[in-house]
Image: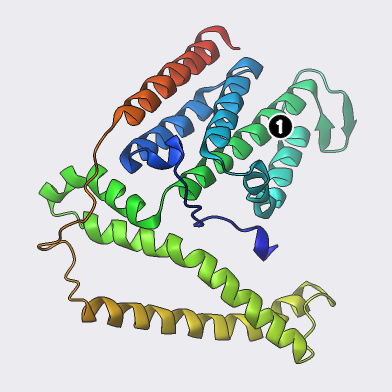
């Protein structure tokens, strides 16, 4: 299961999606999330699915990697589907038993909720797959730049988010090493009741927290040795510039999202 957690991973490439300005990708991602919650019918979700499929194809990221990123949240997807299937009120039910009931409306709502979650997670993973942590930091800091007038710590917030994303794969790898080491010492994480399994996780969590704090201390020391002083006097080797690819992405995404909202809100499609 840990191998399936792909959030925070970056796959270098030279595709048009990789070359897009990180600020543009962040804005498009936010617009896509808003559009997902405004979509209503099969046509709307179908257009968004085709849009995401086209992005995956253009980025040269294997589709199986995107599907792999859905596995860790499979329980949440199934749980959401079950809740909507059995607890959506309706005038007519296809099946009833005590407090459980299934209706056609519940099935439709469950289907759309599952599709919405899958598209949301797939779109978010594509953002991290095609954008390096440094680019994400610079893009987020640039977008939140106006908040600096109100003395909001924009740079520090962007840096913390970037570091958190960057170290997710590292912590996952560290967890796998600790699990393998504990199993080699005879630890059993698969048998017993729920309480026993929780207790069995303690030999994993303690060294993992120690390792995480050690890495944080080493990172802080390295940043101080390189005279890191936050946003004061900071310069960048690569300046963010909006190119033709970015304008094309904005135009295409804007037209498609507008069409989805109109079809969903205006025609219920």
State the quadrant of the C terminus.
top right
For the point 53% across and 33% down, the residue is 58
Image coordinates for residue 241, horizontal then vertical, percent = 24, 39
Instruction: Name which residue lies at 58% across and 69% down.
Output: 172
Residue pictured at 79% horizontal, 90% vertical: 186
* Percent of width and height locating residue 243: 28, 32
Which residue is situated farthest in the top direction here?
267
Residue 23 is situated, as x and y percent measured from the top left of the image, at: 31, 40
Quadrant including the N terminus: bottom right
- Relative to 35, residue 82 above or below: below
Dot 1 lies on which element? Answer: helix
Foreground of the two, 210 or 181:
181
Apparent side of residue 99 relative to residue 255 in the rendered image (left or right): right
In this view of the protein, which residue sits in the foreground, 125 or 258?
125
Report crowding for label 1: few under 14, some 14 to 19, many 20 or more residues within 10 A (C-alpha): many
Q: Which of 260 and 233 lies nearest the eye of the viewer?
A: 233
Q: Is residue 199 above or below residue 147?
A: below
Residue extending farthest to the bottom is 185
Q: Of all residues shown, which one is farthest toward the front?
A: 14
- Residue lying at 13% horizontally and 54% vertically, measured from the top left: 151
x%, y% of residue 174?
A: 57, 77
Q: In this picture, is 182 found above or below 195?
A: below
The residue labelled by disc 1 is 110
């Amino acid at each position: 299961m840990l191998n399936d957690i792909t959030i925070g991973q970056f796959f270098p490439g030279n595709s048009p999606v990789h070359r897009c300005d990180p600020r543009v990708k962040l804005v498009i991602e936010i617009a896509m999330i808003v559009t997902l919650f405004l979509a209503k019918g099969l046509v709307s979700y179908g257009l968004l699915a085709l849009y995401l499929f086209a992005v995956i194809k253009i980025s040269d990221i294997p589709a199986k990697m995107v599907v792999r990123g859905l596995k860790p949240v499979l329980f949440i997807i199934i749980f959401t589907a079950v809740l909507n299937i059995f607890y959506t009120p309706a005038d007519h039910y296809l099946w009833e038993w005590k407090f459980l009931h299934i209706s056609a409306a519940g099935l439709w709502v469950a289907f759309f909720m599952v599709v919405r979650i899958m598209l949301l997670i797939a779109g978010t993973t594509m953002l991290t797959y095609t954008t390096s942590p440094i680019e994400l930091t610079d893009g987020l800091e640039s977008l939140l730049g106006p908040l600096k007038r109100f003395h909001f710590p924009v740079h520090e917030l962007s840096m913390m988010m970037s570091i958190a994303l960057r170290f997710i794969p590292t912590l996952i790898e560290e967890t796998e090493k600790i699990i393998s080491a504990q199993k080699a010492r005879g630890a059993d994480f698969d048998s017993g009741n729920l309480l026993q399994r929780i207790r069995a996780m303690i030999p994993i969590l303690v060294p993992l927290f120690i390792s995480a704090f050690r890495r944080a201390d080493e990172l802080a020391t390295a940043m101080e040795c390189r005279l890191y002083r936050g946003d004061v006097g900071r310069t960048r080797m690569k300046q963010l510039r909006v190119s033709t690819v970015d304008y094309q992405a904005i135009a295409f995404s804007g037209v498609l999202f507008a069409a989805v909202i109109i079809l969903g809100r205006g025609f219920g499609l």
